[in-house]
Amino acid sequence: RVTVKEIRGRVATGVVQRMEEAKATLEAHSREIARLDWPVSELDALMPYRESAQAVQSRGDLTEAAEQLGKLVKRIDETVQVESARFAAIQAFISSPRVAQALTAAGAD
């Protein structure tokens, strides 16, 4: 026989664990992204061919990649917010008296 408390614990453990893993991954990737956030002038100084066509192409590619990275970070932030809201809704649902009554009734059968 499973109690409401055990179900809450299992759900919370599973969801919290996934959220913590996602948060750790997001933080690690954010640190990596921060290292790429250099001014183009500094990047030009690192490239010996800065005025060549290859440098212009590289700069364009880098700018495009940085924009895509920014969009990805924004989507990740939005996803984390949505998942946090869903987690809160699940916790509220599990904590509701209706769920406790339903589980108690199911256990009585």
Image: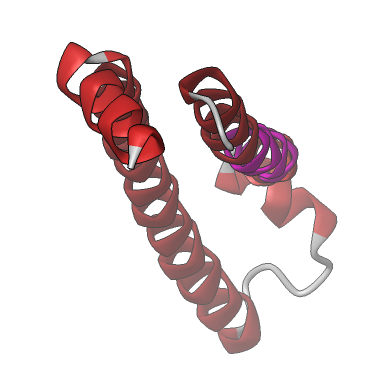
Q: Is residue 75 magenta?
A: no
Quadrant of the rendered structure where residue 78 is?
top left
Between 9 and 46, the residue placed more toward the observer is: 9
Instruction: Let me know if residue 85 appears in the view.
Output: no
Q: Could you tell whether 88 is left or right of 70 in the image?
A: left
**In the rendered view of the protein, which quadrant contains the N terminus?**
top right
Q: Could you tell whether 72 is left or right of 93 in the image?
A: right
Quadrant of the rendered structure where residue 21 is?
top right
Range of magenta residues: 17-29
Judging from the image, the colouring scheme is secondary structure
Q: Position of residue 33 (x, y in %)?
A: 64, 44
Between 74 and 102, the residue placed more toward the observer is: 102
The overriding secondary structure of the stretch rendered in magenta is helix
Indicate whether 51 appears above or below 38: below
Q: Could you tell whether 28 is left or right of 8 in the image?
A: right
Q: Could you tell whether 17 is left or right of 49 in the image?
A: left
Residue at image position (26%, 17%) is 92
Between 80 and 1, the residue placed more toward the observer is: 1
Indicate whether 80 appears above or below 57: above
Instruction: Let me know if residue 87 appears in the view.
Output: yes
Q: Residue furthest front?
A: 109
Q: Position of residue 91 (x, y in %)?
A: 35, 21
